[in-house]
Image (tube, helix red, strand yellow):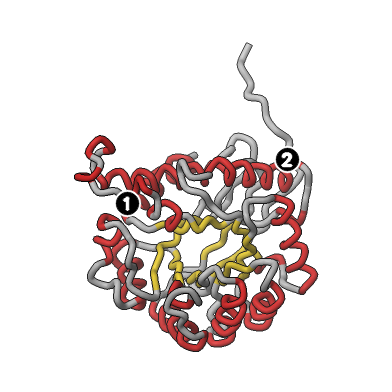
């Protein structure tokens, strides 16, 4: 008697969301089964990887993380171009760290011009990520949305404290909003409801569940993402049927294990390999939990994860 694999019956589907515009636009979502369960359902669009670009030279990156970009780290436009031309980036994730009011506190106008220059310089979709300060991001991301009208950016993080201002910008100038909540499925659903009530179309929402690094809380992120997918696919919860984005690179490369030099901790092995593997393993864990877009940093880690995605999606 032949063995038959037990299969889950799915009644829901993840919405498809198109990021960017033109020939290099990227569509994510559309799954009708749990991640990579191709024997049970469809996964029409493979997960995508966005490469980080900072709007100011990074000061605390480990040497291994900075080395591939040291010649362009002072110029976000050149950095974005290198990511696309040298490393084949499918998306760019511009991190507006200089707008942090506890840091350089650069103005919204300056940030918006930087975003416009970067988006104009590459032909792939661009994610624009604020400083994480809700009040400052409300002003910055609204200005970015206006200045980059028609560029179909992906802007965030959109949180409960600024969803009206940033959401209005997404509606008016047709950008995709990243609904970001702190590792809680109920808060994630609530923010999606608020954005929907505001008028943000479902096709312009992607979810950020907040990401922990390997050994630094990733199990909480995984659990929330897993519950999100269960509710979306088996319980027909329409306010959780959105693609998931994980802004993960900064969480990996700030950890002690990634930042400690080889000579300071020889028992941990080579620092470069250690950081790359930490990023790659974290990425794979998040893919298995249901991530549709990963924001990554090191080209070698990205290469490893691309190979994993190809293997997972091979038919």
Q: For this view, does 3 lie left or right of residue 73?
A: right
Badge 2 marks a residue whose secondary structure is: loop
Choose between 173 and 144: the one closer to the eye: 144
The answer to which quarter of the image holds residue 35 is top right
Q: Which mark is residue 259?
A: 1
Choose between 218 and 33: the one closer to the eye: 218
Q: At 39% from the left edge and 55% from the top edge, which residue is drawn?
A: 254
The answer to which quarter of the image holds residue 158 is bottom right
Choose between 112 and 105: the one closer to the eye: 105
Q: At 63% from the left edge and 24% from the top edge, which residue is drawn?
A: 5
How packed mark 2 is, by other alpha carbons closer than 10 Å (few <14, some 14-19, many 20 or more), is: some
Q: For this view, does 226 lie left or right of residue 236?
A: left
How packed mark 1 is, by other alpha carbons closer than 10 Å (few <14, some 14-19, many 20 or more), is: many
Q: Which mark is residue 157?
A: none
Q: Which mark is residue 10?
A: 2
Pinpoint residue 307: horizontal percent, then vertical percent. 38, 45
Looking at the image, tell me whether mark 1 or mark 2 is earlier in sequence order: 2
Question: As displayed, is residue 156 above or below residue 265?
Answer: below
Question: As displayed, is residue 56 above or below residue 60?
Answer: below
**Mark closer to the observer (1, 2):** 1
Badge 1 marks a residue whose secondary structure is: helix
Quarter that holds the N terminus: top right
Real-space Cα distance between discs 1 and 2? 43 Å
């Amino acid at each position: 008697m032949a063995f038959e694999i037990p299969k889950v019956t799915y009644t829901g589907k993840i919405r498809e969301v198109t990021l960017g515009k033109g020939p290099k636009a990227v569509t994510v979502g559309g799954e009708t089964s749990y991640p990579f369960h191709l024997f049970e359902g469809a996964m029409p669009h493979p997960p995508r990887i966005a490469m980080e670009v900072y709007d100011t030279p990074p000061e605390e990156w480990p040497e291994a993380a900075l080395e591939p970009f040291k010649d362009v780290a002072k110029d976000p436009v050149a950095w974005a171009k290198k990511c696309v031309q040298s490393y084949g980036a499918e998306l760019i994730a511009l991190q507006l760290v200089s707008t942090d009011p506890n840091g350089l506190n650069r103005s919204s106008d300056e940030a918006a011009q930087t975003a416009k220059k970067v988006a104009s310089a590459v032909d792939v979709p661009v994610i624009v990520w604020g400083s994480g300060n809700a009040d400052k991001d409300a002003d910055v991301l609204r200005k970015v949305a206006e200045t980059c009208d028609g560029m179909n950016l992906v802007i965030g993080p959109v949180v409960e404290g600024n969803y009206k201002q940033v959401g209005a910008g997404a509606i008016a100038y047709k950008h995709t909003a990243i609904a970001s909540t702190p590792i809680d499925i109920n808060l994630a659903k609530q923010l999606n409801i608020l954005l929907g009530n505001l008028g943000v179309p479902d096709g312009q929402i992607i979810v950020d569940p907040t990401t922990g690094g390997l050994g630094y809380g990733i199990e909480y992120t995984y659990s929330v993402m897993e519950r999100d997918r269960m509710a979306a696919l088996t319980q027909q919860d329409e306010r959780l049927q959105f693609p998931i984005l994980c802004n993960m690179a900064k969480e990996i490369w700030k950890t002690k294990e990634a930042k400690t030099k080889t000579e300071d901790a020889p028992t941990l092995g080579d620092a470069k390999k250690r950081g790359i593997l930490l990023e790659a393993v974290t990425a794979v864990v998040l893919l298995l939990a249901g991530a549709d877009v990963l924001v990554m940093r090191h080209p070698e880690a990205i290469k490893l994860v691309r190979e994993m995605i190809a293997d997972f999606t091979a038919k």
